[in-house]
Amino acid sequence: MLIERFDTDEVLASTLATRLIDAISLNPRLVLGLPTGRTPVALYRELRWHSQRGHLDWSHVRTFNLDEFVGLGAGDPGSYRSYMQAALFDHVRMTPEQIGMLDGRAPNLVAECARYERAIAQAGGIDLQILGIGANGHIGFNEPGDTLEAETHVAELRAETRRANAGWFGGDTTQVPSHALSMGIATILRGREIVLMATGAGKQDAVAGLVNGQLTPRLPASFLQLHPRVTAMLDRGAAQRLA
Ligand code: GLP
C-alpha cells in the first residue's frame, strides 16, 4: 500500500482532484467509484472549481457511488443522492445514464443490489475507486462484525456509524436510517485501483489498522491490504499512529 501524507486536507483534496483530471484526460471513459461523507467535501469542491473552468470533460465518464441509506432518495436532504447532486452532479455535464447510484427506496432491495452489481459489470468494472473510512474502520457501509458481505447488500448500521452520520440529519441520530445499501468488500476490491482518503485524528486508529493491522472483519478496511494498487492519502491527524 502506498502511503501519502499531506499537511492539510485542502492540499490532499487538490492533489487528488488534479490526479482525477489527469486520469480522465488519459481515459475519457473512466469508470469512477465515489464516496460521500465529510472527507470528500473538499475534493468535490475542487472538482466543481475545475469543471467550471473547463479543465474536466465529464461527458463520457461513468460513476458509481458506494452506498445509500435505505428509505431515502432524491428529494430527501439526508440521502447520499442529494449530497452527490449538490456536491457534483448538478454542476457538471453528465446525463442520468452516466450516474450510478443505489436506490434506497427501491421496492425490492435485494433486487436493487443485484441490479447494481450488473450495472457495474456492464460498465466494464470500476477503474478507480475512491474511498473514505469510518472511525470504526468501515468502508462504504461494510461495518465491523464477525463476517463481511462480498457483494452489494443491505447493511445494518452500527450505533457509532449512525451517530457519525447524524450531522446530515440535523444532529439527530434517531433520524439516521438504521439500514443502508452498500457495495460489498469484493465489489470494492474489484476496482482496478483504489484511493482511500482519511483526514483528522479521529481516523488514526482505523488508519493504523488499515495499514499495519491483521486482516479482520473487525476492521473491514484491513481487507484493502489484499489489493495490489491501493494508495492511502492521509493528513497529519489521520497519519499520526504510523511510523
Ligand atoms: C460514512 C460513509 C462512508 C464514509 C465514512 C466516513 O458512513 N458510508 O462511505 O467514507 O462513513 O465518513 P466521513 O468522511 O464523514 O468521516
Image (cartoon, rainbow, N blue to C red):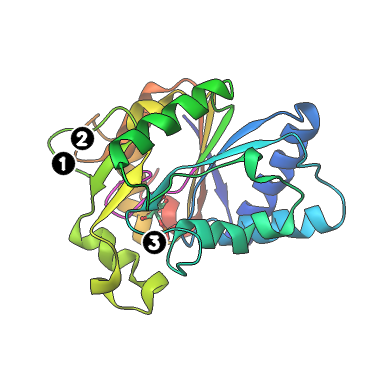
Which residue position is annotated with label 3? 201
The answer for how far apart the CA atoms under marks 2 and 3 are is 22 Å
Q: Which residue is mark 2?
A: 217
Q: Residues within 10 Å of mark 2 (few under 14, many from 20)?
A: some
Residue 1, image x, y percentages: 46, 29
Mark toward the viewer: 2 or 3: 2
Q: Earlier in the sequence, mark 1 or mark 2?
A: 1
Magenta span: 131-140
Query: Residues under labels 1 and 3: Cα distance?
Result: 23 Å
Q: Is residue 168 left or right of residue 235?
A: left
Q: Which residue is at a point 87% across and 50% down the rendered structure image?
A: 54
Q: Main secondary structure of the magenta part?
A: loop
Q: Give the secondary structure at mark 3.
A: helix
In the image, 155: left or right of 90?
left
Q: Position of residue 87 (x, y in %)?
A: 61, 61
Q: Are marks 2 and 3 in contact (CB under 8 Å)?
A: no
| Dot label at residue 145 | 1
Name the kind of residue labelled 2 in the image. Answer: Pro
**Is residue 188 in view?**
no
Nearest to viewer (mark 1 / mark 3): 1
**Residue projecting furthest to the left:** 146
The type of residue carrying mark 1 is Gly
Res. 114 in view: yes
Q: Residues within 10 Å of mark 3 (few under 14, many from 20)?
A: some
